[in-house]
Amino acid sequence: MIVSTATLRGDGRKNQDAIVVSDRAAAVLDGASAWYPQEPGRDGGWYSENLAARLMTTLDDDRALADIVHDAIADMCSTFDLKPGAAPESTLTIARWDDRNVEVFALCDSPAVIYGTAGNPTIVLDDRLQSAGTEARATYRAHLRAGHGYGPELRPLLAKLQEDEFKHQNREGGYWVAEASPEAAHHAYTARFELDQVEAILLLSDGAAAGVDDYGQPSTWREAGSFAVSDPAGFIAHVHHTEDTDPNGQRWPRAKCHDDKAIAVVRPVSALLPN
């Protein structure tokens, strides 16, 4: 497999997305922004960076991906004394392959898009977060649709959303995310595909996926695949520039004008060879 990657910082001081590429795996992590006070130096970007470092050395192990992720989160907890409900967090989406199959692992809302040799692409997306904090989410989006923009009045609305989401974090009936509960790894969405039926896989943070999912630019995942495979950096730059056309979040209400964006494009070597 050949892996191409690109990432782009959003409105924050630091890009909180991270990408892992090993001999037979790739992963995208999206460290969560916090709208409430956090321990200095320990934000979502810090968490995704440190979890990525642990996965870099273990993803190729001949063990179940859920077990590998469980142990990586457990090591984060023991090394940094992280406590459930009081730690930063990150999404995690992985593709791992051998000579016959490709495994996909999705924990929280960063999707994998799998392009087969026929038919429409398959989306593996853990969207359970969207069922938490629905009222607070509707409130902050209504604030933006009314034209109030990204002023100081928005932050407490986003903090309320996160407060409501935390009530459902890493528990049955709620949503699961990489934080300080290693058992979350065993609640990820997973899928397996035959390698010879795969033409390409996109792993995206939600900031990159928003181009299709929220803005419709590109309008379909089929169109996005052609763009992203040929030019991953150009693809996420296009999403970023699309957001520039809606600087106050009125057309597409979202927590910030520009989220961080990351993409990993995974392709079989055979797909790059001439016919």
Image: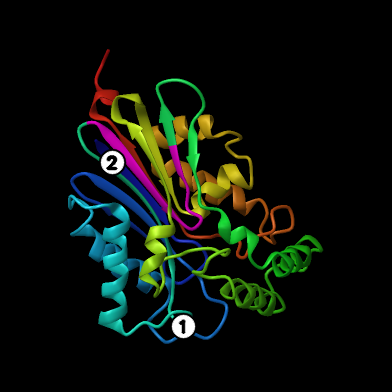
Disc 2 crowd rating (10 Å Cα; few below 14, some 14-19, many 20+) is many
2 and 1 marks in contact (CB < 8 Å)? no
Q: Residue at x 67, y 70 (%)?
A: 150
Q: Residue furthest top?
A: 275
Secondary structure, mark 1, is: loop
Q: Position of residue 139 (x, y in %)?
A: 76, 68
Disc 1 crowd rating (10 Å Cα; few below 14, some 14-19, many 20+) is few
Residue 106 is one of the magenta-drawn residues: yes
Magenta stretch bounds: 100-113
- Residue 17 visible? The answer is no
Q: Position of residue 236 (x, y in %)?
A: 47, 47
Q: Main secondary structure of the magenta part?
A: strand
State the mark number for residue 3. 2
In the foreground, 190 or 240: 190
How far apart marks 2 and 1 lie (CA) works out to: 34 Å
Q: Split into 4 quadrants, where in the image is the C terminus?
A: top left
Secondary structure, mark 2, is: strand
Looking at the image, tell me whether mark 2 or mark 1 is earlier in sequence order: 2
Q: Quadrant of residue 96?
A: top left
Q: Position of residue 256 (x, y in %)?
A: 60, 64
- The residue identified by callout 1 is 86
Asked if 271 appears above or below 151 in the picture, the reply is above
